[in-house]
Amino acid sequence: MIDRRIDNDIVTIYLNGEIAVEHVQLKSKKQFFDLTLEPGQNIITLHAENLGEVAPNTAAILIKTETEEFMAVLESDLGQSSYFKLLYEK
């Protein structure tokens, strides 16, 4: 799978337009970050800081709650970031 190749990709992850995780190098081992969602719509954006050895930058993002899990695979390059919308209901 394209999202499993480790090639020195570096990304920044935004939550609702604000930097949530800056300049993180993608690795084969899962990395965990605690983010606080706002009630209602939240936008999570993957921004490529480089292209690694092979474009585009690809990351699998897993969202975990107490009762559910959701995974999205995002691809970004230097000209275009990708995102998904997540609706959070308390």
Image (tube, helix red, strand yellow):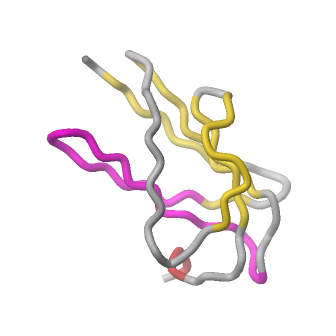
Give residue 39's position: percent from left, percent from top: 38, 16
Based on the picture, tell me whether residue 63 belongs to the magenta stretch. yes
- Residue 16 in picture, x, y percent from top left: 59, 27
> Nearest the camera: 27 or 80?
27
State whether residue 70 is above or below residue 66. Answer: below
- Which quarter of the image is occupied by the C terminus? top left
Q: Which image quarter: residue 8?
A: bottom right
Magenta stretch: includes residue 54: yes
Q: Residue 66 falls in which quadrant of the image?
A: top left
Above/below status of 60 relative to 85: below
Tell me which residue sits at (48%, 27%) in the image. 42
Is residue 10 placed above or below 23 in the rendered structure? below
Q: Is residue 29 left or right of residue 71?
A: right
Residue situated in front as seen by the camera: 19 or 48: 19
Q: Residue at x 47, y 48 (%)?
A: 33
- Range of magenta residues: 53-74
Q: Position of residue 71 (x, y in %)?
A: 37, 55
Residue in the image at 44% along x and 19% along y = 38
Q: Residue furthest left?
A: 67
Residue 6 placed where, x, y %? 61, 82
- Count of numbered tags: 0
Image quadrant of residue 23? bottom right
Magenta stretch: dominant secondary structure: strand
Is residue 88 rendered to the left or right of residue 4? Answer: left
The structure residue drawn at horizontal position 67% and vertical position 29%, both measured from the top left corner, is 18
